[in-house]
Amino acid sequence: MRKLYAVLSIVMLVGVLLSGCGGGGTGGNAKAFRVAVVMPSAINDLAFSQSMYDALVTIQTERGGAENFEIAYSDGTFVVDDAAAALRDYASQGYDLVIAHGSQYGSSLQEIAPDFPETSFAWGTTVDTFVAQGIENVFAYEARAEEGGYVNGVIAGTQTESNVIGVVGPIETGDAKLYVDGFIAGIQAANPAAEVNVNWIGSFSDVALASEAAQTLVNAGADQLSGTAQMVVGAVGVAEENDVAWFGTQSNQTSLAPTVVVANQVYDWTVVLDQMFDLIEKGTLGGQAFALSLENKGLLIEYNSAYNLSDEAKSAAEETIKGIVAGSIAVNVGE
Amino acid sequence: MIGDLFSARVIIGILASGIRLATPYLYAGLGETISQRSGVLNLGVEGQMLMGAFAGFYVALTTGNLWLALLAAGLVGALMGLLMAFVSINLQAKQGISGIGFYLFGLGLSDLLFQKLLGRVETVSGFAPLHFPWLSDLPVVGKIFFQHNILVYIAFALVPLTWFLLNRTTLGLKIRAVGENPDAADSLGVSVSRVRYFTVTLGGTLSGVAGASLSIALLNVFQQNLTSGLGFIAVALVYFGGWKPGGVLIGALLFSMVNALQLWVQTLGIPIPSEMAVMMPYLLTIVALVLAGQRSQAPSALTKSFNRE
């Protein structure tokens, strides 16, 4: 029997190893800036995790490649305990900055960060740096997702003909909630008569349910759809099948449905990462909170050039962006 | 607002969604029924589904041939099933634990292959909804029953076929005998391990197809952890269904329709917190499991390795 358990444990071990697959950084330069990031979904999820990974790769290129800027990551770490182990692991390997890219990793980080006072950590999306708990080596970052949501909402509200608009969300919290609240506020500003239906599916990963939620929203009359988080890839397909306009967020989702994607709010984390790196190089390891916004160009609205957007909707969107940047339009949503 | 739930478009929507959502549960649940009736609990369904989903997606994307893609999904599922059979029959490993191992293996390997071979989320044009002359255009009935893709119909056709296999064929008799009393079956000259190899491999094949019913028919995308726990629900539905194909059908439809119902509850803005709404199908499953537990008997030899003494 002993042999059987040995075989069995090997099968399981291989499974665990494979499921925790991540990329390692290369580079032997002792002076290289070394960053490690733990993410809940895949680096190519066309959403939350990809936005962070792409930003790190951009910075790596700007700083002269892997020799000067080393990246290590663990993606698909949706189990919080696994993420905690990975965070601790990276910290003990002496990375300069260890990023916990997921609101759900907060309590783990709160335990880990004090054990590595020389290491800088970052946690997002949140505004909490744990300074109140006496922890001084954690940066916080978030995205004002409601701003781009508002712009998307203005376009959707302007071009809807059925006056019914649908949204698919994961769980009613964090930047998903901010985005959806902003989207609704934008619709109401542009078209008070429009009805907005929201479906929270209770999961960040259930692609099948997200797609059925989108179908339900279309059946209820929606001619404009949006959604946030990585499980919306199925919902984008439903939009395309039914020829319903789609508004993306977090990453540019145009490639999924080139005929119906109107615009995407794209996160560019380089804006906040650069600020963190500068502070770390000057010796500040945490205690500050950063946010992506339309104003600091951490949030960008990327239009799909293949979509025939009316001049009216386009100029409404541009006016809205200007208004939010200038402060004349206040997107008042909050947790 | 509650009254809106009883309008025609909502009821049509719920029934049509329920039928679509039930499809992967049917493939995986029927496969699991066959394997459990022979005494093998396969908890690796989720991993087999993920591997099938990826294999189907990849072949569809690279060759454009959907039937070839379906075949690939079935073959990969069968291979996973064979491995499971080897571990649980020859090595006599604990079925629950080794099943979890196979789940993690499938989850990890499908993701690794996805990252290495594709590297990004893409779409594929999968099995499109069929259009039957006359039938699909019928009011109400057409929308509910006659506008689905071919894999949906095959899944429902498998319900009577599985019943027939289990209850009206010699092989089915052997499967049930092996699952109830392997010693007696063995003394009558039935090869317990051969029967179990067959059922677990067939179960794996159907799980692979279940994955493909998502990746190349319902969703037409693949991403990490695409199935997101569907395979475990399918295993629960086998218990729910009392190890009978018809029971699995009822369970799959009920679960899916309650899920579709909660989507409509939210869409119509009925003031129930979304957290409550998404719990509805799971609550229902637990309640039904408790009730069903008193009604049906599991195969006596379920999870027990067979050792000829």
Image: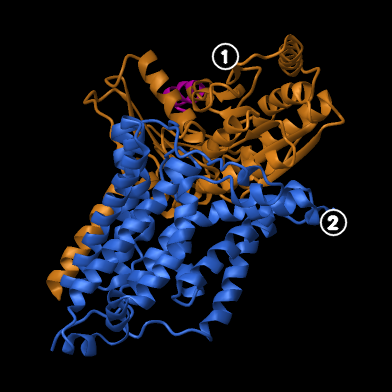
Chain colours: A orange, B blue
Mark 1 falls on what kind of element?
A: loop
Q: Chain of mark 2?
A: B
Mark 2 falls on what kind of element?
A: helix
Vertical arrangement, residue A14 with respect to residue B121, above or below: below
Q: Amino acid at mark 2?
A: Gly
Residue A2 percent across, percent down from the top left: 14, 73
Please identify the quadrant where the C terminus of chain B is shown. Answer: bottom left
Vertical arrangement, residue B246 with respect to residue A267, above or below: below
- Write down the residue under mark 2: B3
- B232 or A116: nearer the eye? B232
Q: Is residue A212 visible?
A: yes
Give the numbered dot on residue A78.
Answer: none
Residue B55 percent across, percent down from the top left: 32, 43
* Residue B15, picture quadrant: bottom right
Q: Residues within 10 Å of mark 1 (few under 14, many from 20)?
A: few
| Image: magenta residue range | A274-284
- Write down the residue under mark 1: A306
Q: Residues within 10 Å of mark 2 (few under 14, many from 20)?
A: few
Q: Is residue A40 visible?
A: no
Q: At 51% across and 73% down in the image, what residue appears?
A: B240
- B159 or A49: nearer the eye? B159
Q: Chain of mark 1?
A: A
Q: Amino acid at mark 1?
A: Ala
Q: Is residue B21 magenta?
A: no
- A64 or B147: nearer the eye? B147
- Residue furthest to the front: B134
Magenta: predominant secondary structure element?
helix
Q: At 47% across and 47% down in the image, what residue appears?
A: B150
Residue A161 percent across, percent down from the top left: 78, 26
Evaluate whether label 2 is on the same chain as label 1.
no
In the rendered view, does A235 fall on the left or right side of A38?
Answer: right
